[in-house]
Image (tube, rainbow, N blue to C red):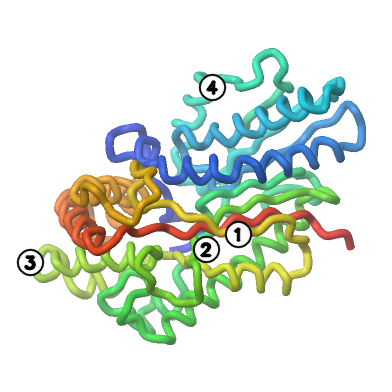
Amino acid sequence: MDATSGVRMATGNGENSYAVNSRLQEKAILETRPVLRKAIEEVYTSLSTRRSTMVVADLGCSSGPNTLLVVSEVIGAICAYTQKAEKRARDVEVQFFLNDLPGNDFNLVFRSIEHFENPGGKEAPPHYVAGLPGSYYAKLFPRQSVHLFHSSYSLMWRSKVPEEISSCTHLNEGNIYIGKTTPPIVIKLFQEQFQNDFELFLKLRSSELVSGGRMLLTILGRKSEEMLMHGDVSTLFELVAKSLQSLVQKGRVEKEKLDSFNLPYYAPSMKEVKALINKNGLFDVEHFKLFESNWDPQDDSEGDVVLDCASSGANVANCIRAVLEPLIVDHFGKDIIEELFMVYASTVAKHLAKAKAKYHIIMVSLKKAMR
C-alpha cells in the first residue's frame, strides 16, 4: 500500500461516513484553537507589505464539516486579531489549499463550500479555497510559498506499510498494527517507517514555508514509551484485530488474509516526535503539549467511569468504521463489514467496562528556523 492509494476515510455523508462520524477530530481542532490563533497572528503581522496574500494549507483535510472548520478558524483568528489590535486591517487575501490523497471525497468538500458560513461577515478578508490532491510525503508547493501548514489527525498515517511486513518477510500474525504478540522486529520496522516519513515531511515543509512560516501539527500518539497502555490507539486497533480473529474462528475470514493485513500507521510518543524535530534542526518548537480525549467521541465527561458501555462501544465502533472501512473492504471485501463492527462494538464495550479509555494526542506548534 503506497501513499497514492488505500488510505481514505468513508466517503459521502451517510450514517457510516467520516463526515457524520468525525466529532473526535472536531474536538481536537477546537482544543488547539488558542495555539492556532497565536500562529495566525504572528504570520499576519509578519506579512511584508500591507497588500499581501497569506497562503494556508491543511494537510490531510479529509471531508465533512471539519475540513471547512479549519478555514473558519483561520478567518476567525484574523478577524479577532484585527479587532483586538484596533488597527486598520491590512489588505490581505487568504488562499487556502485543502490537501489529501486522491481517494479523498473532494466532491463533498467542494459541495460544502457552497454552504460555508463566513465567521467574520463583512470584516472577513477575501479568501479562496482550492483542493490539492497528493501525498504530504511528497513535494506539494513551490519553494517558500506557504505561510502556515495545519495538519490534524493525519501524521499517524504512514506513506506505506513497511515492505518487510507487507511482503510477509516478517509476519505480524493475528494483528493489524502493534499488539501484545507483535514481534520486536515488526515494531522496529513500524518505528523506522515513522522516522523516515516524519523526517521527510519536515524537510519538505521547511522548503515550502516562507521565512518565519508556521506549522501546527496534531498527532494521535502515545503518552509514554510503552506500546500498549489501556487508552492508547494500539489497544484500540488490537480490539479490531480481536474482532477479526473471531470472524476467522467462524470461517468468515481466512487466517492468511488477517495475517497479511497491516495498517500503514504509527502513533509516536512525545519523546519520538521531539527527538526527530531536534535532530532535523529545521524548526523551532514554539508550543508542545499532550492532551487527552475519550475514546467515545460523544462522551465529554472527565470522570473515570463509562456510564453506558454499550452505547459508548457503539459510538467508538462508528468512529473507527468511518476511518477503517475503506481499507478493510479493499483487503477483505465488503461482506464482513456489518458483522465485524457489531462484534467490535461489543468488544469495545467490554473493554470500557474495565475503565474509561482515552486517546493521547500530541500538539506541536513549529516555526521555520532561521538559517
Sequence-earlier tag: 2 or 3: 2
Picture coordinates of residue 220, whole percent (x, y): 49, 58
Q: Amino acid at mark 4?
A: Phe
Q: Residue tagged by mark 2?
A: 159
Sequence-earlier tag: 2 or 1: 1
Residue 358 figure quarter: bottom left
Height in image: 88 above or below 185?
A: above
Picture coordinates of residue 175, whole percent (x, y): 30, 73
Judged from this view, the residue extending furthest toward the top is 122
Q: Amino acid at mark 3?
A: Lys
Sequence-earlier tag: 1 or 3: 1
Residue in the image at 85% along x and 51% along y: 211
Judged from this view, the residue extending furthest toward the left is 250
Picture coordinates of residue 5, whole percent (x, y): 45, 55
Quarter occupied by the N terminus: bottom left
- The tag on residue 137 is 1
Residue in the image at 76% along x and 43% along y: 147
Q: Residues within 10 Å of mark 4 (few under 14, many from 20)?
A: few
Q: CA distance from mark 2 to mark 3?
A: 33 Å
Picture coordinates of residue 183, whole percent (x, y): 37, 85
Q: CA distance from mark 4 to mark 1?
A: 29 Å
Mark 2 or mark 4, which is nearer to you?
A: 4
